[in-house]
Amino acid sequence: MSALAGKLREVTGKSATRKLRNDETMPAVLYGLKDNLSLTVNPKELRKLLEANGRNALIELEIEGDSKRSVVVKEYQAHPLKPGWVHADFLEVDVTKKIKVRVPVVLVGNSPGEKMGGLVNHILRNIEVESIPMNIPEKIEVQMDGVELNDVVHVSDLVVGEGVEILNDPKDAVVTVHVEKVKEETPEGEEGLEGEEGAEGEATGAAADAPADAAGKKEDG
C-alpha cells in the first residue's frame, strides 16, 4: 500500500479553493465509511503514486489532525488549459470487502494479422471488475502476438488474478483484427448514363401504349 499525506481543510468555497491550487497543494474530498472530509494533498505526489501503481492503487492516506485511511481515487479533475490536476475525490474502503472498479485493458505486442493488412480495433478499453482492494489489477493485458487475422478477443478470453471477478458480459468483444472492406466505386458518370437510358426507355414505352388523349390528361394532371 502506498502512502500519501493530507491535511484537513477548514475553509471551503470557491475563493478559498482557488487560493489552495498550486504545485504543492490541491483541494480534495474524502468520502469516508462514516464521515466525509475536506482536505488538501500534493497533486504531484498523488500523480506520481498513480503512475507507479495504477489508477486503482490502494492508498494509505495519512491525514494530519485525523487518522490514516485506506482509500482509492474515485475521480480527479485535470486543469483544462495546462498540465496538472486541480481536484481529487477519494473513497475510503474496507480492505476486507470487495469493491467495483474499472481497470484499463492494454494491448501488448503486435498481431500477426497486421502484417497481412489487418487493422486492430480496440473496442473495450476498460473492464469492470469486483475484488478486494489489495487484489485489484493495475491493468489487464491482451497478448497480441497470439491474435491472428479475423480473430476476436472476447471478455471471456481475458486472464485476471485469483479473487478478481470480471463483471462485463463474457461475449463482449475486446479487440478484433480484420481487413477493412473497400467499397467498389462506380466510374464517374456511368451511373447517371444508365439512369437516363432507363428513364428514356420507360417514357417511350408509356407513350407507345397509351392513347393520345390519356397521355394528354397525364401531362395536364
Image (cartoon, rainbow, N blue to C red):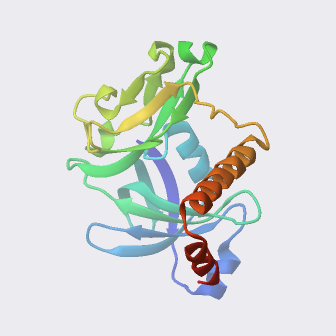
Tell me if residue 83 can be seen: yes
Residue at point 58% right, 77% down?
213
Question: Relative to 106, is 220 on the left or the right?
Answer: right
- Residue 20 point in image, percent of width and height: 66, 74
Image quadrant in which you'd find residue 133: top left
Residue at point 32% right, 26% down?
157
Say above or below: 22 vs 192.
below
Task: Locate the N terminus and report the quarter of the image it occupies.
Answer: top left
Question: Relative to 121, is 173 on the left or the right?
Answer: left
Residue at point 76% right, 65% down?
81
- Residue 143 point in image, percent of width and height: 46, 20
Question: Relative to 52, is 201 on the left or the right?
Answer: right
Residue at point 60% right, 18% down?
114
- Residue 167 point in image, percent of width and height: 26, 45
- Between 182 and 165, which is closer to the camera in this rendering? 182
Q: How many marks?
A: 0
Say above or below: 152 vs 77.
above
Image quadrant in which you'd find residue 48: top right
- Between 89 and 127, which is closer to the camera in this rendering? 127
Tell me if residue 65 can be seen: no
- Between 28 and 69, which is closer to the camera in this rendering? 28
